[in-house]
Image (cartoon, helix red, strand yellow):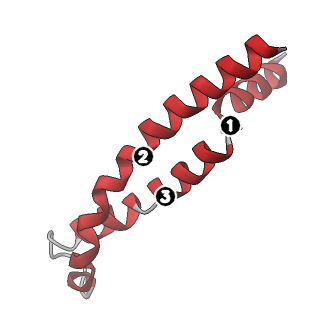
Amino acid sequence: MATRVLHQLADSLEFRSPLAKKLARLAALGWLGFLGALGFLGFIPGWKRLFGFSGLSGFFGFFGVAVWIERIHRRNTHSAS
């Protein structure tokens, strides 16, 4: 029973829409922005070179867009079948 629940959870978290997958990959650039922001703390030597990546933090917003596109995609494919 536990594996069935895990499979349902994994199936609900997966992006099926091609556009949502692309936006989720683009949102992964936000991690570089997070690492760039860690350079401001100054306790990790050499990370000050990552300051330029801190501007990429806005890419995290593409996760929300990808989720909405995925919801619309699932609703349209569910109603068509």
Q: Residue at x 55, y 56 (%)?
A: 25
For disc 2, the neighbor class at 10 Å (few under 14, some 14 to 19, many from 20) is many
The circle drawn on residue 14 is 1
Q: Is residue 72 left or right of residue 12?
A: left
The location of residue 18, given as percent across then percent down, is 68, 46
Q: Give SS at disc 1.
A: loop
Given the image, on which type of amino acid does mark 3 rest? Leu
The answer to the question of whether label 2 and label 3 lie on touching residues, with beta carbons closer than 8 A, is yes
Q: Nearer the viewer, mark 1 or mark 3?
A: 3
Say whether disc 1 or disc 3 marks the residue closer to the N-terminus. Answer: 1
The answer to the question of whether label 1 and label 3 lie on touching residues, with beta carbons closer than 8 A, is no
Given the image, on which type of amino acid does mark 1 rest? Glu
Residue 75: image quadrant is: top right
Q: Residue at x 23, y 78 (%)?
A: 52
The circle drawn on residue 62 is 2
For label 3, the residue is: 26
Number of marks in picture: 3
Distance in Å between CA atoms under marks 1 and 3: 16 Å
